[in-house]
Image: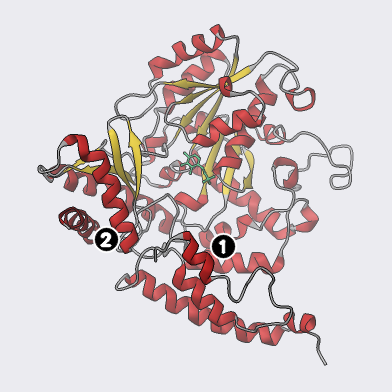
Amino acid sequence: MTTPLEAAYEPDAFRATAHALMDQLADYLKAALGGGAMPVLPWVPPAVNQERFATPFPEVPSQEPSGLFAALMARVLEGSHHLHHPRYVGHQVTAPLPLAALCDAVSSLLNNGMAVYEMGPVATAMEHHVLAWMASTLGLPQSTRGVLTSGGSAGNLTALLAARQAKAGYDAWNGGAHAGPPLTVLVPRTAHYCLARAVRIMGWGEGGLTPVDVDAHFRVRPDALEGALEDATRKGRKAIAVVASAGSTATGAFDPLEPVADFADKHGLWFHVDGAHGAAASLSPKYRALVRGIERADSVVWDAHKGLLMPALVTAVLFRDGARSFDAFSQEASYLFHGDDARPYSDVGLRTLECTKEMMPLKVYACLSVLGTRVFEEAVTASYDQARRFAATLTAAPDFEVAVPPDCNIVCFRHTPAHVPESEWDALQARLREALVTRGNFYLVQTRLPRGVYLRTTLIHPLTRDADLDALLEALRGADQG
Ligand SMILES: *Cc1c(COP(=O)(O)O)cnc(C)c1O
């Protein structure tokens, strides 16, 4: 008789479950892509979901198998946020390529942890090639090396840790943050919050980040860099790096990279580009000028789960001087990394926060090689084009206004109907968003900009049509009436 544990590994039972699951997922995909009656987000208050999922998983799960996999997955599919719904226009999280999701299943089954070559021989090779492709797409030199890590937040921290080893003038990794003068990084005011976290994680406190002003388009002002540097120096901080966003989070604004690179050169600073969202612009012949100068960066972060249609998480951290890729985490763990030269490129754990990690490169490598690169190029170009058309529609409408003309696929706008006084516009945006999101007919987010609260859309689903966006505006108008 097989025990429940043996049965849990039984290949034929797995086959049957997997076939049934694939049918279930394909049906789900068809329904989600079709939009139709399916809500984008089947919104319920957190307590309701908590109650719903109290069975069959109460605080103490049953000791005996329930066997109810398909029924459980049906509930997961039904209650989750449907990113493949073409009216999902919210955060910068993509409707993943279905093929990539299959790769994740393979990665989970193989569980090749990748810290050292022996634990992920194929994935390690794939990671090398995926990174080389990304580097060459950005125009970085052949000396570029890097690593895939768990998200842009971890990626930016990794890059800044390496910048610190390169530029602090002392060994802060081993000696600690107080082994030399206090450090700081120049960062545009519009940068992602993870940079403010990174400097605090490194023990530099609030002053570890020196903000640089942005212009009316939310792009960093190159003429403000000198002043920011002087300000940091006056406060007793040694600036070691300057960061630019290739696609800021709130409005998708691309900082002008060339002048920031010139400034970094002039002062001997490390130049880091946070391209988590927008490094993918480099794939589009039409839009790659947005990232002109990125090839001069010392380090670049690029999220494949934003611009490359991948499921989360897979982020590239690239270093133009490949040897620098080891600087972020420079201590050794002798039980893992043997030998005198403990820095072989094939042991990816030397360069990441993670020890064990998923086979992150598999989905990128597989989709690139199976689907070809044109799919990705088209996705970028089409979504950036669509954002420009959407902004034009908004500008032409008497009762809508865009925050700024979009650089990429992020469009911030607000509803400004004549019958609502301007003093109530902020509250109106929040009310409208809540109405649409809780009804489930669209998913969009909101952001606070200097002029007030704006609705924020990321046109990240390649199959969102202009008609969906027209319907969004109609729904916003209607929500205001009722
Ligand atoms: C999304 C984003 C991040 C954070 O990336 P995660 O993968 O969500 O951790 C960092 N920087 C920018 C510019 C982003 O848009």
Q: Nearer the viewer, residue 12 or 146?
A: 12
Label 1 is placed on what type of residue? Ala
Label 1: state its secondary structure: helix
Q: Which mark is residue 366?
A: 1
Q: Position of residue 57 (x, y in %)?
A: 62, 72
Query: Compared with residue 253, is residue 188 higher up or lower down, i.e. above or below?
Result: above
Q: Quadrant of residue 339?
A: top right
Check disc 2 and report the residue beneath it: 465
Q: Is residue 174 left or right of residue 316?
A: right
Quarter of the image with the C terminus in it: bottom left
Label 2 is placed on what type of residue? Arg
Query: Compared with residue 37, is residue 242 higher up or lower down, i.e. above or below?
Result: above
Residue at the location (47% across, 53% down)? 308
Q: Position of residue 319 (x, y in %)?
A: 61, 35
Q: Nearer the viewer, residue 328 or 145?
A: 328
* Furthest residue toward top: 234
Q: Position of residue 253 (x, y in %)?
A: 36, 35
Query: Compared with residue 441, is residue 154 higher up or lower down, i.e. above or below?
Result: above
